[in-house]
Amino acid sequence: MADKPTVALLGTGIMGSAMGRRLLRAPIALRAWNRTLEKAKPLAEQGAVLGATPADAVDGAQVIITMLRDGEAVLYAMNEAAPKLREGQIWAQMSTTGPQAVPAEVAFADKYGLTLVDAPVLGTKQPADQGQLVIIAAGPQAARPVLQPVFEVLGKKTLWVDDDATRAVASTLKLVANNWVIGLTNAVAETMALAKGAKVDPRLFLDAVEGGPLDVPYLRIKAKAILENDFEPSFALENATKDAALIAALAHECHVSLPVAEAMLARMRKAIEMGHGDEDVAATYFASFDS
Ligand SMILES: NC(=O)c1ccc[n+]([C@@H]2O[C@H](COP(=O)([O-])OP(=O)(O)OC[C@H]3O[C@@H](n4cnc5c(N)ncnc54)[C@H](OP(=O)(O)O)[C@@H]3O)[C@@H](O)[C@H]2O)c1
C-alpha cells in the first residue's frame, strides 16, 4: 500500500467533520481549519492539528482537501492558505461547487503550482462517517497513487471520470446526480404532504410500496424524518438549494429544459423563507403548507 500522506482539511462542517474523523481513525495525519474554529475542536481531541488560519493548516501537507459550502468559500479559504502553499501539493476539491466554479479553481491551482483533482462526493453524513462515500474524481494519473490511501478511507468507491480536472466532468456529473437526489427528496416531501392533506395515513403509503421497485432507501430515510418531525441536518436545505440553483443554471447554459428542477428550486426557496434553511433538506415538506 502507498505511504499515507499528511492531509490538510479546510472545512469541518457536517461532511468535513465526518471525513476528518475517518481520516484520523485510519490513521492519517490530519491538519484542519474551519472558519468557525469551535466546530473543528472535536477533531483536535481525536488527534488533528488545528490551524488558526488556512495557511497554518496547509503548511507541510501533501494533500489539501477543501470541503466547504460553495465555490466562493473554497476560493476564499485557498486564498487565505496562499502564503503557505507550495508547488506540487495535491488539492482535492471535494465540495459541491458545480462546474461553474472549476475554471477559477484551475486558475488558482496553476498560479500556485498545485495539482487540482476535482473530486465531489455522493453520500451524506452517515456514509461519510462510515467511509462509504462515492468519490467522483477527475485529475491527472500522477496524483492518484498519493490520493488512493486517502480516498480508500473516505469512500467505498472512487469513480475516476477524467484525467484532466479542467474539463469539470466530475463536478458536472455531481450536479447530474444531485438533480436525482433533490428530485427524490421533493417527491417524498410532496407525497407525504399530499397524504397528510388528504387525510390518509402516510404510513399506509409506505406499507403499499414496501419491498417493491418503488421502495428506495432514500424514501425511508426522508419519510422517517418527516414522520418523526426530526429535521436534524444530514444535508442542509440551504446547501441543497445552492445545488438546485447550480443545476438550474447548468441546464440553462446547455439549453436543456428542466421545469421540474425549476419548480423544486422554487419550493426549496419557499421552505427557506419559512425558516427551515438550517434543517435537513427533507424540510422542503413545509413548502406544501401555508404556514
Ligand atoms: N451534507 C451532505 O449530505 C453533502 C453531501 C455531498 C456533498 N455535500 C457538499 O459538501 C460541502 C460541505 O457540505 P456540509 O454538509 O458539510 O455543509 P455545512 O455543514 O453547511 O458546512 C459548510 C462548511 O463551509 C464553511 N463555509 C461556509 N461559508 C463559508 C465562507 N464564506 N468562508 C469560509 N467557510 C465557509 C462552513 O464554515 P462555518 O462552520 O464557519 O460555517 C463549514 O465549514 C458542500 O459543498 C455540500 O454541498 C454535502
Image (cartoon, rainbow, N blue to C red):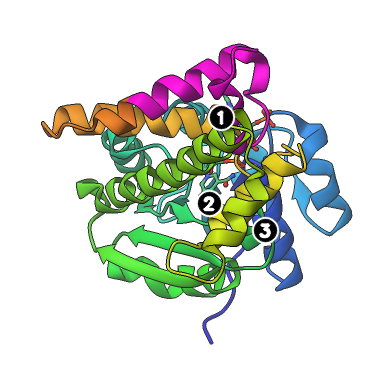
What residue does disc 1 label?
284
Give the SS element for disc 1: helix
Give the SS element for disc 3: helix
Residue 290 part of the magenta-drawn span: yes
Give the SS element for disc 2: strand
Name the kind of residue labelled 2 in the image.
Ile
Residue 10 visible, this orientation: yes
The answer to whether residue 244 is left or right of residue 288 is left
The answer to whether residue 171 is left or right of residue 54 is left
Name the kind of residue labelled 1 in the image.
Thr
* Tag of residue 126: 3
* Tag of residue 201: none
Q: Give the Cα distance between marks 1 and 3.
A: 20 Å
Q: Give the Cα distance between marks 2 and 3.
A: 23 Å
What residue does disc 2 label?
64
Name the kind of residue labelled 3 in the image.
Gln
Q: Quadrant of residue 18?
A: bottom right
- From the image, state whether disc 2 or disc 3 is nearer to you: 3
Name which of mark 1 and mark 3 comes first in the sequence.
3
Instruction: Indicate the position of residue 236 as horizontal and vertical percent values.
Output: 61, 35
Q: Residues within 10 Å of mark 3 (few under 14, many from 20)?
A: some
In magenta, the rendered stretch is: 263-291
Q: Pick the residue in front: 54 or 242.
A: 242
Q: Pick the residue in front: 207 or 155.
A: 207
